């Protein structure tokens, strides 16, 4: 299909898709894909559009406004935006790009999460060329009339978003300050742990440590401490005969009531109910052989 938008050159092509009802309700799905060659007459200026956009620049430049900021993106750059927000982009002469629009289950939440992780909608990473080739191949394939099953499309889009997340936040290195903080939390989970202690351990300010910790793990330090305590509590509830009060003290709570309140709020049921639902018969691992 040929686009009729001003500034789109004749060799360009695009494809549109109508998702199945199953895909609409359960999957991430693609709504458009294309390969455009543009002059400076091509632009988009929209207050909102219901889908997300992933775009790879194969050649040339494009001016972008998004999230109250202006960017110029170049050959090799990837642009990811939630089009429900106001957005503007205009081509320079000789622009070439490939793109997909996508929507569906959690697509906007994932898009905005990645933009936040990356510190903006423009991705400049080594994985860009690989993703750009995939977008080119998908546009060419659909121009030839190929049909892909919904699960295959959903998996492909998810993998691209995963590649962007790895590029934006590399895996935590074993001896990094964040790894040291994590190991300290795991070792001292039954004790009071403060942000100041973790700050001294890593030689980061509390503010910067909190920012970096959340960027690399997805959790604030306090969230990670709570989750680590609850995970240990869940194992103890399932595999030991210890009382709820005993478990509360072992995972760092000063009283059983405070532990029960946090557990119920985060897990969705009381510790007693959790134990009933998850224990296997009356068989428990002995306390002497427990390892947490």
Image (spheres, rainbow, N blue to C red):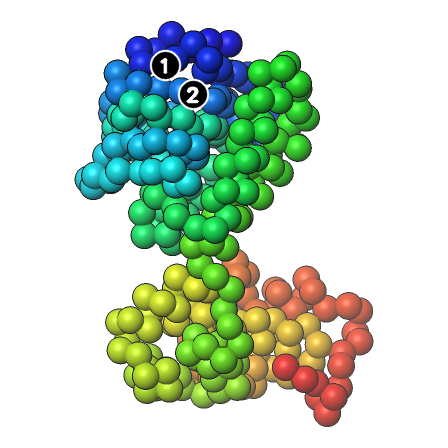
Which residue is at a point 31% across and 32% down the rendered structure image? Answer: 61
For residue 260, side relative to residue 82 (left or right) = right
- Camera-side residue of 241 and 117: 117
Where residue 5 appears, as percent x and y from the top left, is 34, 11
Q: Is residue 158 left or right of residue 192?
A: right
Along the viewing direction, whichever of 127 and 22 lies nearer the viewer = 127
Under circle 1, the secondary element is loop
Q: Is residue 256 above or below residue 124?
A: below
Q: Is residue 42 left or right of residue 289?
A: left
Pinpoint residue 55: horizontal percent, then vertical percent.
42, 33
Residue occupying image coordinates x 43% and y 32%: 58
* Tag 2 residue: 36
Question: In which quadrant of the rendered image does the C terminus lie?
Answer: bottom right
Q: Position of residue 256 (x, y in %)?
A: 48, 79
Q: Check contact, mark 2 vs mark 1: CB within 8 A.
A: yes
Can residue 142 be seen by looking at this rendering? yes
Q: Is residue 185 visible?
A: no
User: 258 or 161, which lies in front?
Assistant: 161
Describe residue 269's horizontal placement relative to residue 121 as left or right: right
Q: Is residue 235 above or below residue 51?
A: below
Report which residue position mark 1 lands on.
8
Q: Residue at x 69, y 65 (%)?
A: 278
Instruction: Say what secondary structure mark 2 lies in.
Output: strand
The Cα–Cα distance between marks 2 and 1, rounded to whole angstroms, is: 7 Å
Quarter-of-image position of residue 108 = top left
Q: Residues within 10 Å of mark 2 (few under 14, many from 20)?
A: many
Q: Report the residue that reaches farthest toward the bottom.
A: 288
The number of callouts visible is 2
**Residue located at (59% from left, 29% from top):** 137
Q: Is residue 98 above or below residue 223?
A: above
Disc ID at residue 135: none
Circle 1 residues within 10 Å: few <14, some 14–19, many ≥20: many
């Amino acid at each position: 299909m040929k686009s009729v938008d001003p500034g789109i050159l004749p060799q360009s092509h695009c494809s549109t898709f109508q998702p199945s009802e199953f895909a609409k309700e359960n999957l991430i799905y693609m709504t458009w894909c294309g390969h455009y060659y543009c002059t400076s007459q091509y632009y988009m200026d929209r207050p909102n559009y219901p889908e997300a956009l992933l775009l790879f620049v194969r050649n040339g430049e494009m001016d972008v406004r998004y999230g109250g900021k202006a960017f110029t993106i170049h050959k090799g750059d990837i642009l990811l935006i939630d089009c429900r927000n106001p957005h503007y982009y205009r081509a320079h002469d000789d622009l070439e790009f490939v793109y997909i629009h996508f929507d569906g289950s959690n697509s906007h939440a994932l898009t905005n999460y990645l933009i936040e992780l990356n510190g903006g909608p423009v991705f400049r990473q080594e994985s860009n060329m690989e993703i750009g080739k995939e977008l080119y191949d998908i546009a060419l394939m659909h121009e030839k009339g190929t049909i892909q099953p919904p699960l295959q499309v959903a998996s492909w889009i998810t993998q691209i978003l995963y590649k962007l997340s790895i590029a934006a936040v590399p895996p935590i290195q074993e001896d990094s300050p964040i790894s040291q903080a994590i190991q300290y939390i795991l070792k001292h989970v039954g004790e009071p742990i403060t942000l100041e202690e973790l700050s001294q351990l890593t030689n980061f300010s509390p503010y910067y440590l909190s920012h970096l910790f959340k960027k690399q793990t997805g959790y604030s330090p306090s969230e990670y401490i709570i989750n680590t305590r609850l995970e240990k509590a869940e194992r103890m509830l399932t595999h030991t005969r210890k009382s709820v009060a005993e478990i509360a003290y072992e995972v760092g709570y000063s009283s059983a009531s405070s532990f029960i309140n946090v557990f119920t709020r985060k897990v969705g049921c009381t510790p007693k109910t959790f134990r009933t639902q998850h224990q296997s018969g009356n068989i428990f691992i002995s306390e002497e052989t427990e390892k947490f």
